[in-house]
Image: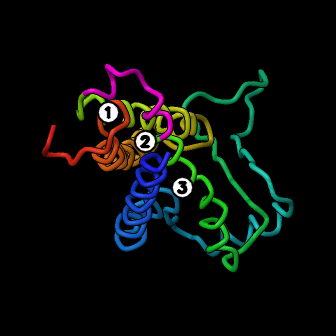
Amino acid sequence: MKRVIVSGLLGFVVIVVWMVLVNGILGFQSRMTMKRIDGEREVYETLKVHITEPGRYTCNPEPTAEGRYPEGEPAYGILYGGVGHEAAGRDMLLQLPIFIVSPFLAAWLLSAASPHVRSRYGRRVLFVSGIGLLVAVWGRLREFGIASYPARDALVLAAHDLALWILVGVVVSARMGPQGKTVPVGDE
């Protein structure tokens, strides 16, 4: 159990360092999820007047005489969480339990994997990275679609999550040896 806890803790450290460097210092995620628009003041004032309750809204073009939306016209998604910039740090605090639990869960799942998976470092990395692939596909790619992320942005965000999980896999797998034994990376 100690190796699972230490491996999970190392995975958590990787997640924190990644988030600080890639998202905090380089601003990757904010550039993807918080793009600026022309005429922001006017759009903001209109939204402030018309959207007063938290929720996800869709703004569609005027329907045609047949009652259908015209082909090729954009549909806009508007998300209002009910809070302002004063809550910016709260989002990170709400995500913190997921960031803490996920590497421990990955280490525990790896410890319970078959001896065949645990026997080689590369297989262990693939196992943990596979968990990341599921997280990326389920978490990010489902955000693609009408009034949501364009396909390119959803794919880039999914690649971001997968890259993070590959790094977590490298670290967790280095600590978790074959049959659950702790083995330094170069000694296999």
Identity of the amino acid at label 2? Ala
- Counting other residues with Cα less than 10 Å from the Cα at mark 1, is it few (<14), some (14-19), or many (20 or more)? many
Residue 89: where, in percent of width, then height?
Answer: 62, 74
Depth check: 52 or 19 in front?
Answer: 19
Identity of the amino acid at label 3? Phe
Q: Give the magenta range.
A: 108-119
Q: Between disc 2 and disc 1, whose residue precedes? A: 1
Q: Is residue 115 magenta?
A: yes
Q: CA distance from mark 2 to mark 1?
A: 21 Å
Label 3 SS: helix
Identity of the amino acid at label 1? Arg
Q: Between disc 3 and disc 1, whose residue precedes? A: 3
Residue of label 1 = 124
Q: Which mark is residue 99?
A: 3
Residue of label 2 = 158
Q: At 37% across and 61% down in the image, what residue appears?
A: 18
Q: Does 179 sit above or below residue 186? A: above
Q: Does 63 sit above or below residue 184? A: above
Q: Does 56 sit above or below residue 129? A: below
Q: CA distance from mark 3 to mark 1?
A: 20 Å
